[in-house]
Amino acid sequence: MYSITGKTMLVTGGNRGMGKLFCEHGVAEGAKIIIWATNEQTMKETAEELTRRGGEVYTYNVDVSDRRAIEKAAENVLKEHGTVDILINNAGIVASAYFWEHTNDQIEKTMHINSGAQMYICRAFLPGMMEKREGRIVNMASAAGLISSPKMSVYCASKWAVNGWSDSLRLELEQEGYSNICVTTVTPGYVNTGMFEGAKAPLMTPILEPEPFVQKVWESMKKGKMVVRSPWTIYLVASMKGILPIRLFDFIFGRIFGVYKSMDEFKGH
């Protein structure tokens, strides 16, 4: 089991939602916390709360849709704090619309934040982990990166990219002998954080409560697990996608389970 005490942990989007919960776990187990976010007010409030709990917390205003901002912030973090031992790529956005209703700016922003940023951030801090020959990387993907869904085409694309890159990174590290740098790819269904407000849970696929889900990811990260999927139906859907004929899959999971209608009343935050 990986020890958190004394480690430096960076969480993108650590000012609220699941990101904040990851920070709380880090503080409880003795990690130094670095938060990247853009909302100064919520970031300050979260840092103050974590500090009252005895945490050592540092905040950086970083727009992760901007590669140069990522590079500059990473340079500052490395200069001021040294190696990041635990990286949690949590920041993400979602826009629900048919593909042709998206603007090019929306497409670019979604791809940059949800997938490109994870790669750039990891690329900045991975050399330090490789030098120490240990570390933990948690990449937040989505069940939407395993199956297609109407009104989520761009979001799905961004999360498919994360799934492919993250697990390939795991294999590359293992192939080169860095087995103590563990990459955990997380593919949840809908999580009740406000990000998917209005989304309807498909049949037998409950909307996840953030606290127990983050606890599950946290323990999996410490154990070095490769993948976290929740709820259990995500395993079923992913397996059936590769077995069933496309039209039969569409009928069962689109019409009977209701996956393809789940975003019809989406509001988000």
Image (spheres, rainbow, N blue to C red):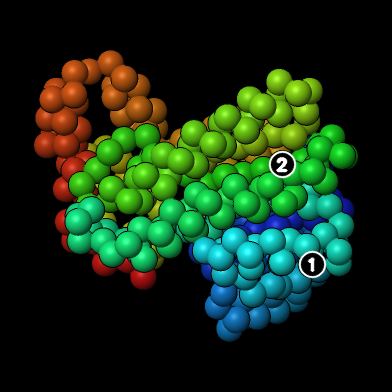
Residue positioned 18% across, 24% down in the render? 246
x and y percent of residue 185 in the render? 55, 38
Amino acid carrying mark 2 in the image: Arg
Q: Quadrant of the C terminus?
A: bottom left
For label 2, the crowd category at 10 Å Cα-Cα, with few meaning under 14, some 14 to 19 and many 20 or more, is: many
**Residue 28 appears in the rendering:** no
The one of 159 and 28 positioned closer to us in this rendering:
159
Q: CA distance from mark 1 to mark 2?
A: 21 Å
Which amino acid, mark 1?
Asn
Which mark, by number, is residue 205?
A: none
Q: Position of residue 116 (x, y in %)?
A: 53, 51
Task: Tell me if 187 is positioned left or right of 136 in this view.
Answer: left
Residue farthest to the bottom, as pictured = 41
Percent x, y of residue 208:
40, 49
Which mark is on residue 136?
2
Q: Which mark is residue 76?
A: 1
| Left-right relation of 136 to 193 | right
Q: Residue at x 49, y 58 (%)?
A: 113
> Is 43 situated above or below 155?
below
**Residue 183 occupies quadrant:** top right
In the visual, does 204 lie left or right of 82?
left
Q: Earlier in the sequence, mark 1 or mark 2?
A: 1
In this view, the residue in front, 235 or 137, is: 137
Label 2: which secondary element: strand
Q: Quadrant of residue 239?
A: top left
